[in-house]
């Protein structure tokens, strides 16, 4: 946290090494989040790219009130949502078809070696996007419900509801897993 | 436990795993950084930073208490944040910038003085020092080095000595001159090993502190040397490590340019309690200076005894690393690499000193499976243990060895084993030391023992083919690495091994 404050301070004052450090520090986490949200490796890479370019462009104007990690995670989620809106056909295609693509690794393939985690990955991709986003921002990036709500311009209740419904759906999909 | 909690835990586990194993590619890093830096450049030139903003103000805007603010400022001073200089708003380099500055160096020239101490029975109240000058030139991209220094030696009868030596390195060829003995010897080593050495040589030549030590530097003053203003940074060990006495380092760093002016190192005296004795003073450090090509020309006085020629330059087995003995076993440790996930690849071979060294070992490598048992060579490197460098560290990580593959060069079979930590470990960046855990398959019983340290050699994903597959090809008669030894396959195998260990 303190290190991030110093990095941001450097970043805002013209130190390009700070930008490199920030990228290096968060690139893997953010890519994992972007892939988990989009269920597409290439799209995930593009999202991280776009977020960092945009972040760099706003260097001098950046007003960060929360943590840098939360800010960047929110940017990732916003960008994924934006791309989905811009190209809903593309998003639908990926959500449904990419799972079976042979030449692309989804987040589950990248990460999983344990059967139960495979199943969690599969189940997550079957959730409605908004629920998946709430769950991943909470459990992957550690954002608070209030933080997620603020970034999405909606009430905390709505986000909590999406999170809860998402978990319930996962529970029913993974019922046998959980009963063990 | 409630089902919802279990689901949360499962998803949390999923997230932790994706985070652990997702890695950006080098192509992606290049693309993102190139575009982001270009955007950043435009942004900061068109919208200059707010003049007059101070660290204090930035921090006070946050919710951190005043007490915490003081702590932040102290930490900022310690880790060398870019700060405003007294008169204006120019940016300044701090100690944490030093590793990046050194990593980016293409050439380096340094002049140092070393002190070595010895007893003098006629002067028991004093420490007697031998002062040794040293000079280095390093050309990283062309893999060249010229070094003038010294080499200490000792004999079993207690006799000790210092020889003045001079060394030239040019890619795979090396010439070592011993000016004390007036001898010249040519050596060869693998290009892979030279590439690895060039990555760390600048740091070693400057006796730089490890990255984890950077946090403990504090600025103790300023000094102008030849018209350049330097900040003086200092740190000292509370206690020694690796069998060495505590050291104190003082570093002169120009805040405006990142130029290193001097690096002085002292060590606590073993003979005179509490006394800091000079150890190495580097007084001249020139980074990215043009070095005349003639500096790297191999040249030695004609009247010296040439022990061999370039044509007969000796190439040690195992990529030039040579061999050593562990009891009755003869061991050659060719190379080792640490991967992103913390797993380690080590190539080694071994034979029985008392048996025919030309004895075929084919049968020991038959039927081996990836992830399975290691071959029953006379010395088996069955595991590693990682010893943290930090004083008073509690835990030691143990790595379990499994068969990854093998290659055969001339008469030697090299086992390429994969060592996986028993628990999830971060990639090795803290400078810990790996020690070999060895067992023996010899006609006469030989107790297992902890062997030599092995180098960390941390490599990135995009370096895997160049270093690991390159080294495998070099240690193969057909000059080819096994097809299935790829970065992805090795990481997958490491995951499987880790999983099986957990079960």
Image (tube, rainbow, N blue to C red):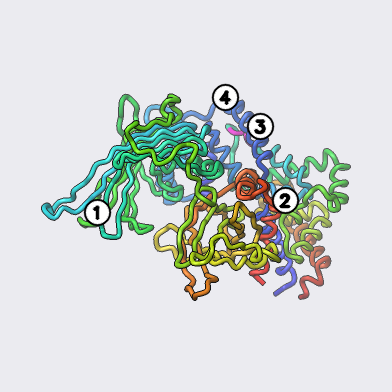
Q: Secondary structure at mark 1?
A: loop
Depth check, mark 4 against mark 3: the one in front is 3
Mark 1 or 3: in front is 1
Q: Considering only order in the chain, which callout, 3 or 4, is on the residue closer to the N terminus? A: 3
Q: Quadrant of residue B269?
A: bottom left
Instruction: Give B440 or B78, whichever is nearer the viewer.
Output: B440
Q: Nearer the viewer, mark 2 or mark 3?
A: 2
Q: Return the chain for callout 2.
A: B
Within 10 Å of disc 2 (Cα), the crowding (few <14, some 14-19, many 20+) is few
Residue highlighted by disc 3: B35
Residue B183 rendering spot, x and y as whole percentages: 35, 40
Rendering coords of residue B159 (x, y %): 25, 55
Camera-side residue: B363 or B59? B363
Numbered disc 2: secondary structure:
loop
| Nearest to the observer: residue B418 or residue B359 | B359
| Cα gap from disc 2 to disc 3, whole angstroms | 35 Å
* Residue A59: x %, y % from top left: 59, 33
The lab-note entry on whether marks 1 and 2 share a chain reads yes
The residue carrying mark 4 is: B45
Instruction: Please name which of the two marks, 2 or 4, marks the residue nearer to the observer.
Output: 2
Which callout, 1 or 2, points to the residue nearer the camera?
A: 2
Residue B432, magenta (yes or no): no
Q: Quadrant of the C terminus of chain B?
A: bottom right
Magenta residues span A54-59
């Amino acid at each position: 946290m303190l290190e991030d404050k110093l990095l941001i301070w450097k970043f805002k004052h013209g130190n390009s090494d700070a930008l490199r450090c920030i990228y290096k520090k968060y690139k893997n986490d953010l890519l994992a989040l972007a892939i988990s949200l989009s269920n597409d490796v290439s799209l995930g890479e593009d999202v991280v790219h776009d977020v960092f370019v945009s972040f760099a462009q706003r260097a001098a104007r950046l007003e960060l009130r929360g943590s840098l990690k939360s800010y960047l995670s929110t940017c990732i989620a916003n960008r994924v949502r934006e791309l989905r809106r811009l190209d809903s056909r593309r998003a639908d295609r990926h959500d449904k078809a990419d799972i079976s693509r042979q030449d692309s690794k989804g987040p589950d393939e990248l990460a999983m070696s344990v059967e139960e985690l495979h199943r969690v990955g599969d189940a997550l991709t079957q959730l409605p996007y908004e629920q998946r986003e709430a769950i991943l921002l909470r459990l992957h990036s550690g954002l608070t419900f209030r933080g997620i709500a603020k970034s999405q311009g909606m009430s905390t209740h709505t986000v909590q509801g999406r999170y809860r419904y998402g978990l319930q759906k996962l529970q029913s999909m993974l019922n046998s897993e959980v009963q063990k | 436990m409630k089902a919802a909690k279990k689901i949360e835990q499962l998803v949390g586990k999923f997230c932790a795993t994706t985070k652990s194993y997702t890695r950006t590619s080098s192509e992606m890093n290049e693309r993102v950084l190139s575009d982001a830096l270009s955007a950043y450049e435009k942004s900061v030139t068109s919208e200059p930073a707010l003049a007059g903003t101070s660290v204090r103000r930035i921090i006070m805007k946050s919710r951190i208490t005043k007490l915490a603010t003081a702590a932040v400022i102290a930490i900022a001073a310690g880790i060398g944040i870019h700060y405003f200089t007294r008169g204006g708003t120019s940016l300044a380099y701090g100690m944490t910038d030093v590793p990046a500055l050194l990593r980016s160096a293409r050439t380096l020239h340094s002049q140092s003085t070393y002190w070595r101490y010895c007893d003098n029975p006629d002067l028991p109240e004093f420490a007697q020092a031998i002062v040794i000058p040293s000079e280095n030139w390093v050309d990283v991209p062309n893999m060249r080095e010229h070094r003038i220094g010294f080499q200490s030696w000792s004999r079993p009868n207690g006799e000790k000595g210092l020889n003045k030596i001079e060394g030239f390195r040019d890619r795979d060829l090396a010439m070592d001159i011993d000016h004390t003995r007036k001898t010249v010897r040519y050596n060869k080593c693998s290009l892979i090993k030279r590439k690895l050495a060039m990555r760390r040589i600048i740091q070693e030549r400057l006796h730089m502190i490890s990255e984890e030590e950077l946090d403990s530097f504090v600025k103790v003053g300023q000094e102008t040397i030849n018209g350049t203003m330097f900040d003086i940074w200092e740190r000292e060990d509370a206690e020694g490590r690796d069998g060495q006495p505590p050291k104190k380092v003082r570093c002169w760093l120009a805040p405006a340019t990142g130029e290193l002016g001097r690096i002085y190192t002292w060590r606590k005296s073993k003979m005179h309690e509490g006394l800091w004795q000079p150890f190495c003073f580097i007084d001249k450090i020139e980074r990215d200076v043009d070095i005349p090509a003639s500096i790297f020309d191999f040249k030695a006085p004609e009247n010296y005894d040439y022990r061999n020629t370039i044509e007969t330059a000796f190439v040690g087995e195992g990529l030039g690393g040579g061999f050593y003995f562990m009891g009755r076993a003869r061991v050659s440790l060719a190379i080792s690499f640490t991967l992103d996930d913390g797993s380690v690849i080590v190539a080694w071979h071994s034979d029985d000193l008392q048996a025919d060294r030309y004895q075929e070992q084919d049968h020991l490598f038959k039927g081996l499976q990836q992830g399975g048992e290691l071959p029953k060579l006379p010395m088996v490197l069955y595991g590693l243990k990682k010893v943290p460098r930090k004083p008073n560290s509690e835990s030691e990580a143990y790595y379990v060895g499994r068969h990854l593959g093998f290659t055969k060069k001339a008469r030697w079979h090299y086992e390429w084993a994969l060592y996986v930590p028993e628990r999830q470990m971060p990639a090795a960046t803290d400078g810990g030391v790996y020690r070999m855990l060895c067992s023996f398959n010899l006609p006469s019983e030989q107790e297992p023992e902890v062997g030599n340290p092995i180098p960390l050699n941390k490599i990135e994903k995009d370096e895997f083919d160049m270093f690991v597959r390159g080294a495998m090809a070099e240690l193969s008669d057909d000059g080819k690495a096994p097809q299935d030894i790829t970065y992805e396959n090795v990481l997958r195998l490491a995951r499987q091994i880790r999983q099986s260990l957990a079960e």
